Image (spheres, coloured by chain):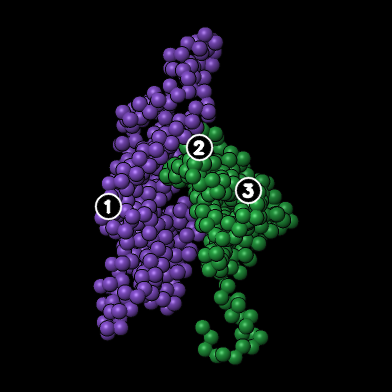
Chain colours: A purple, B green
Amino acid sequence: MGTYIIKRLVHSVIVLFGITLFVFLLLYFSGDPVRLLLPMDATAEQYNAMKQAMGFNDPFFVQYLRFLDKAVHLDFGISLRNQVPVFGLIASYFKNTLLLATAAFIIALIVAIPSGILSAIKRNSILDFIISIFVVLGQAMPLYWLGLMLILIFSVDLRWLPSGGFGYSTNLILPAITLGVFSMSRIARMSRSSMLEVLNQDFIRTPRSQGLAEAQVNFKYALKAAAIPIVTLIGTEYCILLEGTVVTETIFSWPGVGQLVVQAAYARDYPVVQAVVILITAIIVFFNLAIDIIYTYLDPRIKYGKL
Amino acid sequence: MSKDLEVTWGSKYKNLIIRNLKGIFGIVVLTIAISTAIFSPFIAPHDPYKQALDQRLLPPCWQSGGDVSHVLGTDHLGRDVLSRLIYGSRVSILVGFSAVFFPGIIGITLGLLSGYYSRYLGAVIMRIVDMFLAIPYAVMAIAVITAIGTGLSNLILVLTITRWAHYARIMNGTVLQIKGQEFIEAANARGNSTLRIMLRHILPNAVPPILVLATLELAFMIIMEATLSFLGLGVQPPTPTWGLLASEGREYLTVAWWLTTFSGLAIVITVLGANLLGDWLRDTLDPRLKI
């Protein structure tokens, strides 16, 4: 048990190192910040002086280690656009993104899991067919298009909901639904296939042959077994949801990290983009690590190697 | 299945089609999409770049105010929506296939190598793969775009850099599985060179899962191109691409619904086709995956 956790921990740390290196490499090769910061008519001497002062003449690894050191202390520099410390900027927007992602996640779970399980129980029925259609369509729709269509229907035509902004509870509804639908298809699909796999197994045949009502068989036995893969999926899905916030926040003008990173990318605000990548990835890596560890308690077979 | 044991000519072919409906639909849709892309100049009724400011924001022809010469209406600069849609397929198909081909080549090669030399080289390559797979995709794409800039070729480059790891991982797993088979052992005993084993024996058997992945990746890359272009980080105006059409239409959403809607529908249908094809491939090739 201990070795498994240690192996996973080491793995996560290596991955994080790799990511910071990757991000740092990107920026290292992508532009010349000294030239950006100096006025056009700077002389060669001023250029060299600034370069030296900012530490860009140092060897690559020294710069990288300096970058790492600052990152661990949560110092990601200053935003090129509005001259505020990057980390503070991200932190203030992050809670909005979390709010949106969590709301969307809850909506997705409430709709998708029952649908998936129902469509497995009543396989090849009309219900299964209808749900499958929705699932398949849901996976083919681009997120931005779904958002825009919802705005078209509910804000422009029906005028029931605002098309964007922040501050009132109604502002949350459309973005949360948009983002939620994004995940629903995958979760429903996974619930369905997991439930189907379980329903075909021998340990379900036993209570069924003993005469238990079908519903009881389903809920008492099948559901618990089917839950394990669904729980794994849920972890990954939340992370994918976080990715979806990039587009959703842009469409609905929701003041979150997603919108921030898009605007920063547009304005070539490297420090912000850099910081967002590292922070979000770090969060996801640790989140997955936590899930894996919790998993060894849920399903002891894991620690003896992937089943 | 069929309750009647008698097989007539009609029922035989009907069953074949119904069982493989997903795949047929997918192939048909993709063929239409690719043909539209290739033959755009011959299909499109108008020049997609030609502006006509006296004909701005015409609705589709079945609504009042619409004009039959502009079947799906015009945009805010008077350009025909249908023509822009048709030419837009060029970008989507081009980017979609490139973003499957290039990362595929890199990923398959690295996956093959890491699977075959799994002890040291494989371990290193797989760690790198893990690293790439850990970064959430949208964020990584945006970061790379910030570094290297927007535009069509940059977009393909970005998609290549960010996507190869998926192919490498599947390839690695598949190769490991194949390596343990007896016919590989036999080939080795015969004295076949490593290269020959890799190309003649391992690679053909690794095709099924890669093919499924490639098809699903195609679908995802089309969506990605549209999304990035929508955000202004992909292909730049005035080149028509389905994502850009949607973003251009967004400003006029309250008065002109047709700009955004049709470009999205085009994506939905194409991606649906690719997804269904991938699902069908997965279902069809699945029993044979356990070689």
Secondary structure under badge 2?
Answer: helix
Q: Earlier in the sequence, mark 2 or mark 3?
A: 2
Mark 2 vs mark 3: give the one in front.
3
| Residue type marked 1 | Ile
CA–CA distance between discs 1 and 2? Answer: 34 Å
Q: Position of residue A145 (x, y in %)?
A: 48, 54
Q: Crowding near pointer 3: few (<14 within 10 Å), some, many (20+)?
A: few
Q: Which residue is mark 1?
A: A294
CA–CA distance between discs 3 and 1? Answer: 43 Å
Q: Identify the image quadrant of residue B67.
A: bottom right
Q: Which residue is mark 2?
A: B144
Q: Is label 2 on the same chain as label 3?
A: yes
| Residue type marked 3 | Thr
Q: Is residue A29 toward the left or the right of residue A160 in the image?
A: right
- The reply to whether dot 3 and dot 1 touch (C-beta < 8 Å) is no
Could you tell me which chain the residue with mark 3 belongs to? B
The structure residue drawn at horizontal position 46% and vertical position 53%, both measured from the top left corner, is A143
| Towards the viewer: B62 or B3 | B3
In the rendered view, would you say B256 is above or below B64?
above
Could you tell me which chain the residue with mark 1 belongs to? A
Q: Crowding near pointer 2: few (<14 within 10 Å), some, many (20+)?
A: many
Q: Which residue is mark 3?
A: B194
In the rendered view, would you say A232 is above or below A276?
below
The structure residue drawn at horizontal position 32% and vertical position 48%, both measured from the top left corner, is A4
Secondary structure under badge 3?
Answer: helix
| Towards the viewer: A50 or B235 | A50
Q: Position of residue B251 (x, y in %)?
A: 49, 47
| Residue type marked 2 | Val
Q: Position of residue A151 (x, y in %)?
A: 42, 55
| Towards the viewer: A182 or B170 | B170
Q: Is label 1 on the same chain as label 2?
A: no
In the rendered view, would you say A25 is above or below A117?
above
